[in-house]
Image (cartoon, rainbow, N blue to C red):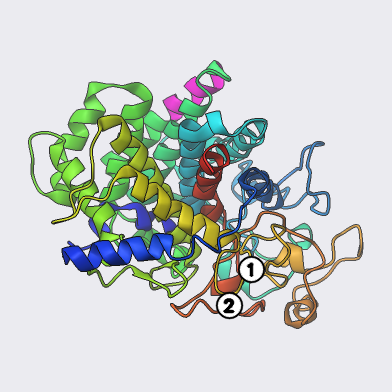
């Protein structure tokens, strides 16, 4: 899933041909500077947050701004005697997957924590987007040693093309517990709750304490009852959001956020004690910096590394579907790390070259500008931004007539004609960033059946919120 793009241990060590690497790095970042567009990053920020309102499940609030969406999935959880309404649909389907929702929440919270000061009036909407997720995650973790990790049968859902408001597919509920562990999704959920507790620390102290207390409990469950949820729930969660790299990185991720939220020594000691999971045994945290430096080096252009490439137009490309998830997550890391380096007065040692924090920011900005339209096709990959953007995104609610326009029920297979239609989607999912080019050629098919390229996801947008906030203040 998207979260794996952030795990330093998932990339092998790079090699550093110094002069060639530096030359290619500089050429990539600056070659298009003469033709780059002056973007309205604040407008893009506004739209990237608005997108989350189009992904809402449950009873919509009176201040819902995307008015073509209506209430949906109001009985989620009822089959197991639980209230599991709310939360987000992860992408263009009508399933609530807990793993990507938790990752989205963590990255959206991180965006607010580090860049909320740059959001202006939009910080309120960003915080509301976090709360829509955490309200659901609190419901999903209300029972000790149980986490409800999915609502909806993905195979049943993907066999239909219907609005969330019309859903009549199976709303099967899936959970992890002591007998069926899921340290990966539980660790990510603990991270999300801990990160969000920081967002609400001064805004709503009581709610913040609730989130943090729950994060502690969920993490204890994740650590005590170890196992991968892909093993416990394979038929339900694979091949959609399998955890292919193991669960130990999510345990460190959860511990890191709990340490940041609590400053308790026990979490720092947990990280040091389990550090060999990712980067070899050490007695302190210094190897984390070394590993983080190596990870940043591995994504720079010109560095020999088979897993990260750059297209002729300058886009980060990593093999697999929905490439923009890698673009936004890696760019977010480049920006965050550059800020940390600036505060520490430190450069990244990449062999014989040492890219500066400013250079990392330029590379992150280059990726954002590509998304917003500085690319060979001259199109924005964010719906509603710029004069040219994807019109036929792979998204059920956006592509089918709204309930207001077509009050009658549209059944499972009746929606197929809208899926196959060459017409643009009738409902504008403003702010949605699609998967983008699926190969290194910078090409893009604006067609619903090409889901890897045209489907938006919450975890593409979550880190982009932080990027846009920063560049709106530092264009």
Question: Is residue 301 among the parts visible in the rendering?
Answer: no
Which residue occupies the foreground of this view, 411 or 315? Answer: 315
Q: Which residue is mark 1?
A: 379
Residue position for label 2: 444
Identify the image quadrant of the N terminus: bottom left
Q: CA distance from mark 1 to mark 2?
A: 10 Å
Q: Where residue 301 sits: x, y (%)?
A: 31, 64
User: Residue 156, labelled with which disc?
Assistant: none
Query: Image point 64% across, 68% down: which residue?
Result: 379
> Looking at the magenta stretch, what is its main secondary structure?
helix
Quadrant (top left, top right, bottom left, bottom right) of the C terminus = top right
Q: Does the residue at mark 1 contact the one at mark 2 (Cβ under 8 Å)?
A: yes
Numbered range of the magenta stretch = 206-214
Q: Is residue 89 magenta?
A: no
Instruction: Name the front one of labels 1 and 2.
Output: 1
Task: Check disc 2 and report its element: helix, strand or loop.
Answer: loop
């Amino acid at each position: 899933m998207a979260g794996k793009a952030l795990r330093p241990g998932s990339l092998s060590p790079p090699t550093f041909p110094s002069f060639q690497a530096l030359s290619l790095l500089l050429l990539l970042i600056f070659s298009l500077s003469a033709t780059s567009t002056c973007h309205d990053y604040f407008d893009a920020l506004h739209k990237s947050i608005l997108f989350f309102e189009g992904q809402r499940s449950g009873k919509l609030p009176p201040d819902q701004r995307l008015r073509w969406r209506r209430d949906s999935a109001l009985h989620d959880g009822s089959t197991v005697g639980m209230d599991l309404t709310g939360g987000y649909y992860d992408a263009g389907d009508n399933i609530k997957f807990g793993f990507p929702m938790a990752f989205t929440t963590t990255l959206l919270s991180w965006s607010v924590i580090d860049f909320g000061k740059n959001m202006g009036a939009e910080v309120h909407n960003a915080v509301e987007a976090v709360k829509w997720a955490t309200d659901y995650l609190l419901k999903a973790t209300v029972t000790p040693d149980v986490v409800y990790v999915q609502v909806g049968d993905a195979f049943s859902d993907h066999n239909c093309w219907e609005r969330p408001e019309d859903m009549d597919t199976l709303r099967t509920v899936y959970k992890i517990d002591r007998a069926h562990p899921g340290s990966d999704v539980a660790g990510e959920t603990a991270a999300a709750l801990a990160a969000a507790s920081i967002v609400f620390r001064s805004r709503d102290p009581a709610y913040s304490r609730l989130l943090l207390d729950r994060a502690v409990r969920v993490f204890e469950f994740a650590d005590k009852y170890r196992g991968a949820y892909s093993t416990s729930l394979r038929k339900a969660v694979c091949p959609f959001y399998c955890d292919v790299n193991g669960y130990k990185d999510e345990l460190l991720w959860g511990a890191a956020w709990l340490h940041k939220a609590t400053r308790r020594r026990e979490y720092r000691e947990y990280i040091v004690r389990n550090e060999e999971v990712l980067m070899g045994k050490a007695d302190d945290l210094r190897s984390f910096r070394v590993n983080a430096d190596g990870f940043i080096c591995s994504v720079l252009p010109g560095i020999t590394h088979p897993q990260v490439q750059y297209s002729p137009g300058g886009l980060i490309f990593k093999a697999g579907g929905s490439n923009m998830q890698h673009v936004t997550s890696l760019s977010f890391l480049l920006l965050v790390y550059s800020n940390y380096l600036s505060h520490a007065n430190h450069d990244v040692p990449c062999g014989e070259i040492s890219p500066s924090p400013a250079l990392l920011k330029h590379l992150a900005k280059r990726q954002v500008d590509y998304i917003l339209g500085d690319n060979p096709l001259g199109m924005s990959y964010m719906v509603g931004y710029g004069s040219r953007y994807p019109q036929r995104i792979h998204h059920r609610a956006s592509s089918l007539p709204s309930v207001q326009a077509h009050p009658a029920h549209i059944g499972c297979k009746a929606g197929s004609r809208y899926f196959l239609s060459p017409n643009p989607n009738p409902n504008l999912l403003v702010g949605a960033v699609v998967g983008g080019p699926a190969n290194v050629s910078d090409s893009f098919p604006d067609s619903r059946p090409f889901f890897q390229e045209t489907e938006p996801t919450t975890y593409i947008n979550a880190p982009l919120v932080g990027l846009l906030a920063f560049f709106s203040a530092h264009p």
